[in-house]
Amino acid sequence: MLFPAAILGLVVFIYGIVTMWWENQVSDEICNDYFNLTMCPLCDKFCGYWSLGESCQSAMASHLFDNPATVFFAIFMSLWSTMFLELWKRRRHALQYLWDLQTFRQEEERPRPQFEAQVRHTKRNWITQEDEPWLPFIYRIPRYMLSAVLVLFAIALAVGAVFGVIMYRVSVQASLALNRNELIATNANLVTTATAATINLTIILLLNMIYSHIAEYLTELEQPRTETEFDDSFTFKMFLLQFVNYYSAIFYIAFFKGRLIGRPGKYVYTLGYRQEECSPSGCLVELCMQLGITMAGSQLVANNLREIFLPKILVWLNFRWLIQAMAGKSEEERKKTGLSTMGTGLSPCGHRPQGTVLRPEISKVQDDEVGDGTTSVTVLACELLKEAEKLVAQKIHPQTIVAGYRRATDVARAALQDASIDHGNEPEKFREDLMNIARTTLGSKILTQYKEHFSKLSVDAVLRLKGSTSLDAIKIIKIPGGGLVDSYLDEGFLLQKKPGVNQPKRVENARILIGNTSMDADKIKVFGSRVRVDSVAKVAELELAEKEKMKEKVGRILKHNINVFINRQVD
């Protein structure tokens, strides 16, 4: 979606280069020696008069970004950005449908573990009818006030840094204008803008590191109740602080620089210095340099170096340290120090709030879907969570971490497929494989002492399915009394059902008819239906008709010459 806009922007830039010499009226007037206009000094004491033609290069450079094609490009970008957002909404809804998340709703979000641990007041939740931690509003007021004061101080710090850069620009430009080297004096504005933008970029990166810690500390200080409230408060603070940090200098150049300088003979002074002025062609070149250095520098340092190269360097250094630590040690010494031959060791989640929330959920899902491996999946998930926290601390985006885990899952699945052995065509070996799986599964349960007995029952039951994966065909009937060893797999069909009143308890040489429906499926439920009659006698006639119909149905069943009848009567 961004390639068409990038290509069009490149075409507009090339158009500016092509038309720089014959369709640029502003630069033609500035660069024409015929006019030879003399300009006022840029400073009061040491600077002399200068010619307007000295700013010819700046005027020609501004045409690259300020030409008739840029007007069309600006209109195109406004429309393209709107279309980009709308298409992204469609893509988001398509992903929701693909991932089956359209009906996902979180009815009631639970409080954060940190909130539950720190808050001492409780309040009854009218939805769950449980007492939950609650922070009264009177206790929140000082926290919000302190948070607001610190945020305003952080904003003032960013604005003060911009003011310091402005004073640097004013003093350095005046100093360079006095230089005897004509090349330096002529390009004083360009050198000042480039160095000031670089200094501003350094300040932005440093303040961003400070602001992230400040925003997290203030959000924890406010003690939001849920994770959603925490994310909203943290996002608001980070957006506000980073907006001021990134765009203060850009707003100054675009809207304030050169507007409040005064006039010859009555200049406006700040701390003894004259306000800095834009070049005769405008401040557009300086604005483009500021934008370019800020955006490209932050992308290069904050994203590429910190998220790509720095993790690779840390992994390499960690690997080298691990090799040195394991060199010359025996296997027992490695076990004592927690180092294995593969260089990794599993450790528990500890008391991390994420682990506290995830552990029961992971175990429950594993038990519902598979029925075994709850301990193993919990330990593995805790290790993955611990490693993910390290990557997040290195400013790696969670989506990148999840994508890596998914790729690792594919690799692990492919490795398991390559290492697997299929004994499906060898009944004896296939049965032994199933027995080993059953023994492993039952080895950690309360059936450990009887795992051979129950492994045989389970394998025999699964083999009777003859390749079907529908475990619903295996019925488990629990009867009080007896011991575990009394469990058995019946060769036939067991039905746990009591005989009717005055019916025999035992039938030999039985001839059985099973009806997969209830006997009164077509019966009119008089007291559950709406039937209009003229008198009570009509109701008696309906009941008599139903009895005759049932009698006819029983007669048709008896014609099959049976002595046992079983049906799905549910009431």
Image (cartoon, rainbow, N blue to C red):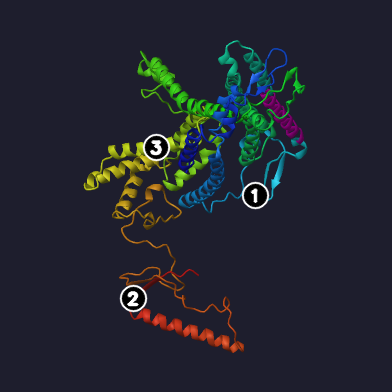
* Residue nearest the observer in this picture, 505 or 205: 205
Magenta range is: 141-162
Instruction: In the rendered view, tell whether residue 414 sits above or below residue 296.
Output: below
What residue is shown at x 37% (from left), y 78% (from top)? Answer: 557
Magenta residue check for 242: no
Q: Give the CA distance from mark 1 to mark 2.
A: 56 Å
Q: SS at mark 3?
A: helix
The amino acid type found where label 3 is placed reads Arg
| Residue at x 45% of width, y 22% of height | 314
Q: Mark 1 = which residue?
A: 128
Disc nearer the start of the sequence (2/3):
3
Circle 3 sits on which residue? 407
Dots 3 and 1: beta carbons under 8 Å? no
Residue placed at 37% from the left, 47% from the top?
485
Q: Secondary structure at mark 2?
A: loop
Question: Along the polypeptide, which appears first: circle 1 or circle 2?
Answer: 1
The rendered magenta stretch, by its main secondary structure, is classed as helix
Note whether residue 378 is visible.
no
Give the image location of residue 447, x and y in percent. 40, 42
Q: How busy is the neighbourhood of tag 2: few (under 14 within 10 Å), some, or many (20 plus)?
A: few
The residue mark sitting in front, 2 or 3, is: 3
Amino acid of disc 2: Ile
